[in-house]
Image (tube, rainbow, N blue to C red):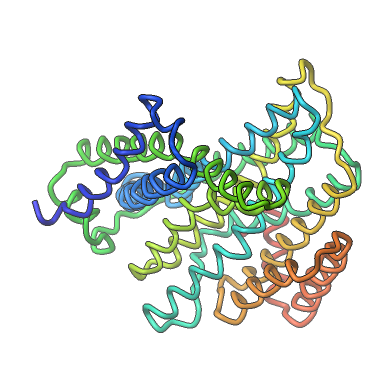
């Protein structure tokens, strides 16, 4: 039983909030306590997802396992963002919040999530660089394609059915290509809970446990995500913070926490490449499926496929998010992410908060693009990899 103690604890810490949410008692609690209990549940679910993902790689292609892991761990962001999109269809005041939450979440993922994995890996294992698995070439291709397309959205000023078709098409292509990839059974690579379960279960039992772990963790995250984010926003409002900034930054910090925590767990275990793979996959599915879902949900709520119009502030946010994504793709194009590159991602992200003038976003957008062009200019390898990515030959 001692061998399974971490799994038992991970399950137990999710139960208090799940019980309170299912019985309706959580709705009457203080926002701080709600965030604490829901946050602990998300952490427990993240551990369960991690063990499930390790086992899943024994039976399905690695890229498909990472897509599944990313989709489940990003459920909080979908829950929060699409809720804003639905409300926007009924109340125009919510229009800015859907885009604010989406852009904030994407920038938090790259600006905080990616660097943290590198730093944890460095301090725990004394490795200055994470080697990205070459199988992530598919994700790199889709990241670059979706990023280049994303530059068109602020130019045309709307999120519409065209974006739904193109971005959903990219995601479906990504999922189909990942499902066709090969996989290898790597028994020696399994550790801890995953190794114990694999040793005791046959093929059928292992697959059943993987599905059960994914289902339980996904349900726990679904029940915890929105209360966690709203609890944090509620605490922020109590201290007089601006609601737009809360929606853009505090809520994404909450909703992105499962996937970031999961990636950090992998980094601590020495599997930083897997952790980064999960975050890259999360970025791709948020940049395709989530962005495409926003105008779909908005149109359904509004009673017709009407486009979601973007104001000047939203266009600035989208342009900056696209520029950061382009820089991140260029950084990854040598299939390594080192501590200096991670520091650059973190510094550029945090520096934006030093300038309250919203128009400074244009300056940071230009800076990201100049740095990207500079890296491409001096590195033939990066140019070659990105060209192969754009032509889907990665």
- Against 147, is 16 above or below? above
Q: Residue placed at 78% from the left, 40% from the top?
A: 96
Extreme residue in the front direction: 239
Quadrant of residue 347 within the rendered picture:
bottom right
Question: Is any atom of residue 180 visible in this view?
Answer: no
Q: Residue placed at 61% from the left, 73% from the top?
A: 334
- Against 224, is 36 above or below? below
Looking at the image, residue 169 sits to the left or right of residue 207; the answer is: right
Extreme residue in the top direction: 303
| Count of residue discs | 0
Quarter of the rendering occupied by the C terminus: bottom right
**Residue closer to the observer: 364 or 273:** 364
Quadrant of residue 322 within the rendered picture:
bottom right
Question: Is any atom of residue 156 visible in this view?
Answer: yes
Looking at the image, residue 350 sits to the left or right of residue 29; the answer is: right
**Residue closer to the observer: 173 or 364:** 364
Percent from the top left, x then y, of residue 138? 58, 54
Looking at the image, residue 19 sits to the left or right of residue 160; the answer is: left
- Against 257, is 28 above or below? above
- Against 261, is 384 above or below? below
Percent from the top left, x then y, of residue 46? 38, 50
**Residue closer to the observer: 294 or 209:** 294
Percent from the top left, x then y, of residue 74? 52, 44
Q: Residue placed at 79% from the left, 17% from the top?
A: 304
Percent from the top left, x then y, of residue 195? 21, 56
**Residue closer to the observer: 234 or 372:** 234
Q: Residue placed at 38% from the left, 37% from the top?
A: 220
């Amino acid at each position: 039983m001692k061998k399974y103690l971490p799994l038992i604890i991970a399950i137990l810490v999710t139960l208090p909030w799940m019980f309170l949410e299912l019985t309706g008692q959580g709705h009457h609690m203080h926002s701080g306590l709600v965030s604490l209990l829901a946050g602990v549940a998300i952490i427990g679910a993240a551990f369960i997802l991690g063990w499930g993902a390790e086992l899943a790689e024994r039976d399905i292609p690695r890229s498909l396992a990472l897509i599944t892991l990313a989709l489940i761990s990003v459920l909080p962001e979908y829950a929060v963002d699409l809720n804003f999109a639905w409300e926007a269809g009924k109340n125009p005041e919510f229009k800015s919040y859907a885009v604010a939450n989406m852009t904030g979440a994407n920038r938090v993922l790259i600006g905080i999530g990616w660097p943290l994995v590198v730093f944890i890996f460095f301090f725990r294992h004394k490795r200055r660089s994470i080697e990205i698995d070459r199988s992530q070439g598919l994700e790199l291709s889709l990241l670059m394609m979706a990023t280049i397309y994303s530059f068109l959205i602020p130019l045309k000023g709307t999120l519409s059915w065209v974006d739904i078709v193109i971005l959903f098409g990219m995601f479906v292509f990504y999922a189909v290509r990942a499902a066709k990839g090969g996989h290898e059974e790597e028994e020696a690579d399994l550790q801890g809970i995953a190794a114990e379960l694999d040793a005791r279960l046959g093929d059928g039992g292992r697959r059943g446990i993987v599905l059960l772990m994914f289902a339980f963790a996904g349900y726990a995250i679904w029940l915890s995500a929105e209360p966690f984010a709203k609890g944090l926003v509620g605490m922020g409002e109590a201290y007089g913070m601006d609601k737009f900034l809360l929606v853009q930054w505090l809520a994404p910090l909450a909703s992105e926490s499962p996937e970031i925590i999961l990636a950090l767990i992998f980094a601590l275990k020495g599997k930083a490449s897997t952790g980064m793979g999960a975050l890259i996959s999360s970025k791709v599915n948020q940049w395709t499926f989530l962005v495409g879902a926003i105008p779909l949900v908005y149109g359904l709520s509004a009673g017709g496929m009407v486009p979601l119009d973007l104001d000047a502030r939203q266009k600035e946010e989208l342009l900056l998010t696209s520029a950061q994504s382009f820089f991140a793709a260029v950084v990854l194009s040598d299939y390594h992410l080192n501590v200096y590159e991670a520091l650059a991602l973190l510094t550029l992200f945090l520096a934006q908060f030093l300038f309250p003038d919203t128009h400074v976003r244009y300056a940071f957008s230009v800076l990201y693009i100049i740095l990207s062009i500079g890296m491409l200019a001096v590195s033939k390898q990066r140019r070659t990899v990105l060209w192969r990515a754009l032509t889907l030959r990665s």
